[in-house]
Image (cartoon, rainbow, N blue to C red):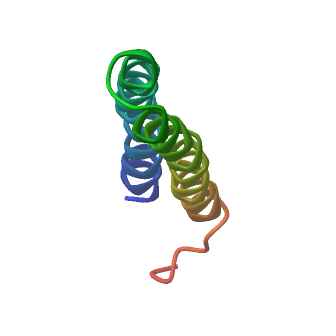
Amino acid sequence: MRTAITMIFFGTGWLLQILGGLGIFGLFIYGIYALFVDSIIGGLVFIGASVVGGWVIRFVSGLLMLAGTATIGANNSEN
């Protein structure tokens, strides 16, 4: 059971990094587009949001992977 929980946590953290990274990359590209085409302020807001979003995604995925690591060392209460 611990192996399944570990795989779920690691898989969720990995999936969040991949999909979140793609979303953040898209937001950054749109920020550059908005910077030159639409508005300087709007473009800078989107670029800043992509940077902060990247920090949040890295933190949350790191916590998920840490939780997966913590389940490896957990004792089995049935024994």
| Residue 50 position (above or below residue 65) | above
Tell me which residue sits at (38%, 30%) in the image: 27
Tell me which residue sits at (42%, 18%) in the image: 29
| Residue 1 position (above or below residue 10) | below
Q: What is the x, y in percent for residue 41?
A: 47, 41
Decide which of 70, 24 is in the foreground and name it: 24
Q: Quadrant of the N terminus?
A: bottom left
Report the residue that reaches farthest toward the bottom.
Answer: 77
Decide which of 20, 34 is in the foreground and name it: 34
Tell me which residue sits at (42%, 27%) in the image: 31
Number of labelled discs?
0
Horizontal side of 13 relative to 38 (left or right) equals right
Horizontal side of 43 relative to 76 (left or right) equals left
| Residue 72 position (above or below residue 35) | below
Tell me which residue sits at (46%, 35%) in the image: 14
Decide which of 43, 59 is in the foreground and name it: 43
Horizontal side of 58 relative to 41 (left or right) equals right
Q: What is the x, y in percent for residue 70?
A: 63, 64
Q: Quadrant of residue 18?
A: top left
